[in-house]
Amino acid sequence: MKPRVLGLVGPTASGKSALALRAAQALQGEIVCMDSMQVYRGLDIGTAKPSRAEQALVPHHLLDVVGPGQAFSVAEYRGLAQAAIAGILKRGRLPILCGGTGLYLRALSQNPQLGGTPGDPAIRARWQALAGQSGNQAVHEALRRRDPARAAQLHPNNLRRVIRALEVLELTGQPMSAQRLSDPGEGPYDLRLYALRWPREQLYQRVDDRVARMLQEGLVEEVRGLVAAGLSPQAQSMQGLGYKELLPFLSGQASLADCQQLLARRTRNYAKRQLTWFQADPRVRWLEAQEGLDANLARIIKENEADETKD
C-alpha cells in the first residue's frame, strides 16, 4: 500500500498556508513546502514564507535549503522532498505538501527522468549571450522552432528553463517534450490533493492586497539587501515574483507605484496560470474558500478519516 500524502495546492494568495498549518495541527502532520522560491535563504517577504512563529507550531521542511545565489533544480527538489516525506512517515506522522509549484508536484507524483542529462556550461553561455544581445524572446523563438510543445509551456522570461530545454535538445538530440512521464497513478504516494477556490475577482483582490502588504512589511528593503550583498540580478532566485519587479525602482528607473502595479499584474497572471494547471488535474478536490477555514478544515479531516477507514 502506498503511503498517504496530503497536499494543499492551487494559486498564490488563495490561503493554502493557513489551511495547511491548521490541517497539520489537527492531523499530526508536518509540512513539506512545495514552492520554488521558499527554498532560498534570505527571500522571506517576497515569497510569503511561513513566519518563525508558524514554523514553531508545526515542523516545516524544504524552507531555506539553498543560498540565494545558487541554482536549484526540480530534480534536487524531488530528492530532498522524498527524503523529508520518508522521515515524516517514519515518525508516524502525515506529510502535507503545501505550495503552488506544479512542476514540483509533478516530480513527486510521477516518475519523470529528471536531471539525467548533464549540463554544458558552453551551451548555456552561448544562449545567455544571445539573450543579452537580442532579448529573451529571441531565445524562446529558437526553442519554439526546435521544440514547439516545450516552448508553449514556458514564458520567454523563464530564461533558465528555456535554455535548459535547448541544452537538453542539443546534448541528446531529443526534445524535452518527447520525454515520457509516467501516469500519476504510478507514483510512490497516495496523494490526496485539495485546493481553495475563490471567485476570480476576489482572488485577484487578494493578490493585490498581498502585494501591498509585502511592501509595507519591507519587501523593498529585502531586495535592496540582497543586491547590496552582491546577489546578481540574473540569479535564479531573483527571477521570482517580487524581486525582479523592484529592481527598476532601486536603480532609479521607475517609481515604486509603477513597480507595485507591475508586480500585482504579473502575480495575477501567475495565479491564472496556476488555476489552469491545477484545474486540469483530476486528483484535486476543490474547496469553496468562502465557506471559511473551519468548514474546509472539517471537510479535510472528515475525508481523511473516511479514507483511513477504507484502508
Image (cartoon, helix red, strand yellow):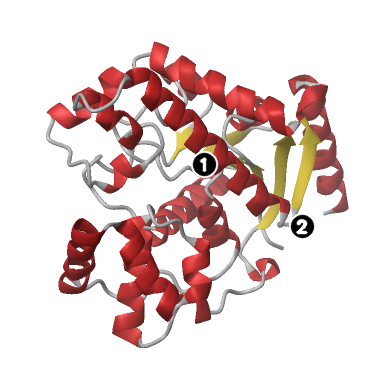
Depth check, front residue: 1 or 180: 180
Q: Is residue 229 above or below residue 104?
A: above
Marker disc for residue 282: 2
Q: CA distance from mark 2 to mark 1?
A: 22 Å
- What amino acid is at disc 2? Pro
- Taking the image as shown, residue 197 lies to the left or right of residue 219, namely right
Instruction: Give how far across and how far down residue 210 sits, in percent.
Output: 52, 21
Instruction: Give how far across and how far down residue 9 sits, in percent.
Output: 63, 42
Q: Secondary structure at mark 1?
A: strand
Q: Nearer the viewer, mark 2 or mark 1?
A: 2
Quadrant the N terminus occupies: bottom right
Residue at 32% across, 39% down = 40
Depth check, front residue: 59 or 117: 117
Of the numbered discs 2 and 1, the one sitting upstream in the chain is 1
Instruction: Give how far across and how far down residue 24 sits, in percent.
Output: 63, 31
Mark 1 Cα-neighbour bin, 10 Å: few <14, some 14–19, many ≥20: many
Q: Residue furthest top?
A: 216
Q: Is residue 298 above or below residue 241?
A: above
Q: Can residue 117 be seen here?
A: no
Q: Secondary structure at mark 2?
A: loop
Q: Residue beneath label 1, please?
A: 32
Instruction: Give how far across and how far down residue 94 sits, in percent.
Output: 63, 41
